[in-house]
Amino acid sequence: MQDPKTRNAVIAAGAILLGFGVIWLLMPRIMLALGAESPLLAGLFATLFVLAFFGVFWLRARQQKRKD
């Protein structure tokens, strides 16, 4: 069995991946809608999405280091 710390980490990672997965599936529609207004806005959204994906895991790792 897993200890509670490992189980919580797996649950958190799964929730984050699920949330970003849903946005990833909606990404073409979002990009087309934003691109109709401004191609720059669509590119900015895509860049922020990728940065947010890695940023969430980076922040979670920092939080875990502080707890230990």
Image (tube, helix red, strand yellow):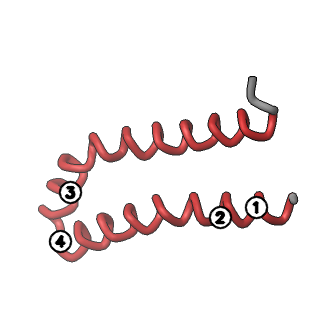
Q: What residue sits 79% from the left and 64% below the top?
A: 65
| Residue in view at x 15 percent, y 64 percent | 35
- Amino acid type, mark 4: Ser
Evaluate if marks 2 and 4 touch, with contact meaning CB atoms under 8 Å apart: no
| Residue 52 falls left or right of residue 11 | left
Residue 44 horizontal/vertical position (percent): 30, 73
Residue 4 vertical position relative to residue 36 in the rendered view, above or below: above
Left or right: 22, with 41 as reference point: right
Nearer the camera: disc 2 or disc 4: 2
User: Would you place residue 34 above or below residue 12 in this image?
Assistant: below
Q: CA distance from mark 4 to mark 3?
A: 10 Å
Residue appearing at x 27%, y 40% in the figure: 25
- Is the residue marked by circle 1 packed among few (<14), some (14-19), or many (20+) residues within 10 Å? few
Q: Residue at x 54, y 37 (%)?
A: 14
Query: Circle 4: is it few (<14), some (14-19), or many (20+) Cα within 10 Å?
Result: few
Return the residue at label 1. 63
Hey, what amino acid is under mark 2?
Leu
- Whichever of labels 3 and 1 marks the residue nearer the N terminus, that label is 3
| Residue matched to label 2 | 59
Labels 4 & 3 near each other (Cβ < 8 A): no
Residue 67 occupies quadrant: bottom right
Nearer the observer, disc 4 or disc 3? 3
Amino acid type of the residue tagged 1 in the rendering: Gln
Q: Residue furthest top?
A: 1
Callout 1–callout 4 Cβ contact below 8 Å: no
| Residue 34: mark | none
- How far apart are the two marked residues, 3 and 1, measured between alpha carbons? 32 Å
User: Residue under circle 3?
Assistant: 31
Q: Which residue is mark 4?
A: 38
